[in-house]
Image (spheres, rainbow, N blue to C red):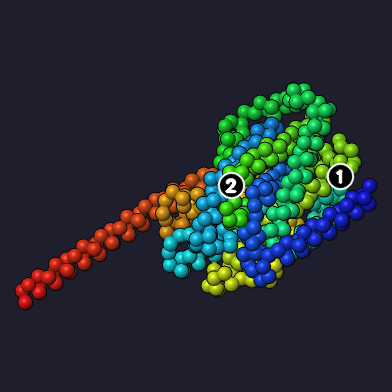
Amino acid sequence: MILGNWIILILSSLILIGIGFWTQLKIKKGSSEGFLLGAKSIGAFVGAGTLMATGYSGWGFIGSPGTTYAYGAIEIFANFFFAPAITFGTLFFAGFMKKKAEEAGGFTVPEYIAKTHNGNKTQKRIVHGLGGIATFVFLSVYIIGQIRAIGLVASQWLGVSEHLASIILMIVIIIFTVQGGLLAVAITDTIMCIGMLVASIIVYLTIIKDVSMTELINSVGAIKPEFINPTTSNPYGEGKYKVFLVFIYAFLFTTTLPYMSVRFLSFKDKINIPVMALIMAPMGIILSLVPIVGLYMFYKNPNLPNPDSAMPVFLTSYLPPAIGGMIILFILFAMLSTISSVLQALASSLSHDLFVAFTDKAEKSSTVINRIGVVFTGVWGLVLTYIAPQGMLNQIAYIGTGGLIAMFVGPIMMKPFIQANITACLLSMITGLVTSTLFILKLNVGWVEAPIYAGLCACFVYVVSALLIKEKTEEKESAKEKTNIENCISSVAAEDVD
């Protein structure tokens, strides 16, 4: 059986690399736009598939069942907020961001932020560079959880250690990403999203065939009442209703994170975003069924040493080998596609954002530099995975993304409603970074609460700074106009005297 799994993995990897090679032919040779934005050729169906696959893959199939196993039904409830949040985020902001990016230019989210705010060149370069550094730092944390997730799943399937499994799969994903860029990632995401939808349905039907939902809930409640009738929203906060903040978090996750919102910039012209949202909604609902596995595994075996192993154990123990292997394959390659997205965002933060910000050579980064960046960040992610302290995959994911959300939420979310310059943008980003760090590291605020509260602080600073700067600018213009009028009157009076 293990030999068969290896054969399937090799064949699937060759197909994946083949897709990367094919998409490389579709994008312009040497074009940063082609590599970083998929030649702006992503349509409604592929757009829906890539957003949902990226939003749900690693944490959705491994981290979320693990969190359910550790904390109970609160995670199932929280998971259902992601589908509407990702859909609404796309519906309300994708068109605006694409339009502004077309007007101002920009191949990455940090560059988009810098170019859509008025100011002098030095300030724009600072904002662009700060955004690039933040993207690299926070996504370096995020990718740790993703790499550990593929190692956890693949090790049991291939019969090797988690470290060896993650190294093998990272080699595949680096080769794939280096070839085709975002277009290859988006197409593969969509294929894997279809597989994930099929897997979600199979998993759910397998569970209810063995035990009804009513019996499952009652049985788990008898073992641990807190799992079914929680008095807190842990791990999302101590308050009973803090779990509702997950919707806000997921909305911000979609609209501000570079590896998610960069897809908005890659959509083709005249894309029908409402149609894409209609495709996304049912996808998200089906994918939200997956955390039930965690509750089922707690019912079957409440003594697993690692909560994150709930899904891998379920697939290898409660499904026929062929079906379990197929689902593992879909999960693995969906996670690989997400890692590819994160790798590209990490690489572009170095090869494009920091390169352009520090050299002041606007849009001169080449695909060669971008591809070298992918290789470097892939190796970097593996090194971090081995030296970083252990933690639950969901927790690592939230910490890694929370800081970026707090930094970028002001300049992205407030921009449609208020005209602010680059100074207000910079102050907002610094506020988000500082407050998010304090909330997470010093005040022990919940995973979801920290970026939301920090984001609120950043938005407040953005709006207040914009209004103060606008008022000061108007006062200067008024004083200048008054001076001009006085000078004109004095000049006329002098002419009359003459």
Q: Quick one: SS at disc 1?
A: helix
Q: Which mark is residue 325?
A: 1
Residue 4 at x, y percent in the picture: 93, 50
Total numbered labels placed on residues in the image: 2
Farthest-out residue, left: 497
**90 or 74: which is nearer to us?**
90
Taking the spot 64% from the left edge, 52% from the top edge, the residue there is 43
Q: What kind of residue is marked 2?
A: Ile
Taking the spot 67% from the left edge, 68% from the top edge, the residue there is 28
Q: Which residue is mark 2?
A: 273
**454 or 462: which is nearer to us?**
462
Taking 191 as reference, is 176 above or below it?
Answer: below
Badge 2: residue crowd in 10 Å (few <14, some 14–19, many ≥20): many
Q: What kind of residue is marked 1?
A: Gly
Q: Is residue 206 visible?
A: yes
Farthest-out residue, bottom: 498
